[in-house]
Image: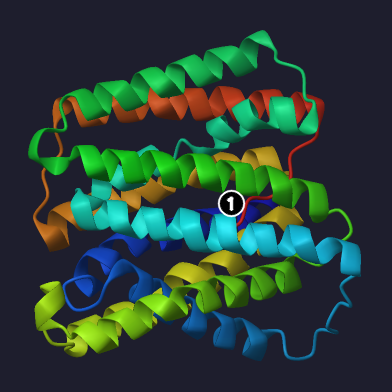
Amino acid sequence: MSKQGYLYAALGAMGWGTTFIATKIAITAVTPGVFLLARYAIATLVLLAFYRGRPRQKVARKDWPMIILIGVLGYFFAIWCQHAATAAMDASLVSLLFAATPVSVLLLAMPVLGEKPTAKKLLAIVLTVAGALLVIGKAGGGSTPAGLALALGAILSWSLTSVLIRKICGHMDVVWLTIYTQIIAAVCCLPMLVRQLLLGQEALGLGPVGWSHIAAFLWAGIVSTAMANLFWNRALDLLDANTVSLFYAFMPLTTSVLGVLILGESLSLNFLAGGVVIFIGMVLAAGDMKSENKTEGIKK
């Protein structure tokens, strides 16, 4: 069973890694917000079809403010920032920075959940920040100040969302939580769709929608979101969450390989060295979470 869990975790993280490639293709014809809307609309339909026999959980009135906050802050704002950062920088760079999310979750869990800092936690945070600075410092043409700011906003807001999810998933079905929050995020994207329709493609510097863009929409919705979440959830059923979190490393690895093959991106020595430092920080973070046995799964 553990071998199956490893496979599901790897497939889930690899699926997320392809999101950055699909984003790079899609944003030549639509804005990041419209792409996010298409992604969630397709993914939600797939999840509803897959879980059609699953009883719909009744949500207590007191839980709705938290669900709305998760949908707006995490599934809308954080992932919109991720897509916008990918539009401004190399996909492999954004993916690598986003892989540091589990460590930033440790940092935010201290004040929000009252978790106590440990030497291993602090070392994990320091290493991850150092690795990120190493990557950014020599990113060259692959980064922009605006892109880095968007990536930082995405990482921090998604990390806070992950902490909030850990507070609510103890008494909520994670599948229905994902569906509800995706619908909320999709609604938040509607004004961006209206804006693009009113202004037109040319005014926004966008090209016509072609088959490659449609393929990117379908891939992002079905593979990068619905299937990736299904695989990740299945891995969490078979393995402890800290072990599963180690497979986040497959996300930037997948993006980097596909970025080189499909997008023609290049990987510097600093990128590779920084990636190793970030991975070490992730391993330390997962080991510390295992010792406390407090980790919950993080959904993207």
Tag 1, which secondary structure?
helix
Decide which of 234, 6 is in the foreground and name it: 234
Q: Quadrant of residue 284?
A: top right
Point 61% across, 26% down: residue: 107
Query: With 162 as the anchor, is 66 left or right in this view?
Result: right
Label 1, residues with CA under 10 Å away: few <14, some 14-19, many ≥20: some
From where the camera sits, is residue 273 visible?
Answer: no
Identify the image quadrant of the N terminus. bottom right
Query: With 18 as the anchor, is 236 left or right in this view?
Result: right
Expressed as whole percent of the image width and height from the top left, the position of residue 136 reads 24, 29
> In the rendered structure, which amino acid carries the disc numbered 1?
Tyr
Identify the image quadrant of the C terminus. bottom right
Expressed as whole percent of the image width and height from the top left, the position of residue 228 reads 52, 66
Expressed as whole percent of the image width and height from the top left, the position of residue 194 reads 36, 85
Decide which of 276, 294 is in the foreground and name it: 294
The color scheme shown is rainbow
Residue placed under numbered mark 1 in the picture: 6
Q: Quadrant of residue 231?
A: bottom right
Identify the residue at the far top of this view: 119
From where the camera sits, is residue 274 visible?
Answer: yes
Decide which of 115, 292 is in the foreground and name it: 115
Expressed as whole percent of the image width and height from the top left, the position of residue 135 reads 25, 28
Point 70% across, 54% down: residue: 236
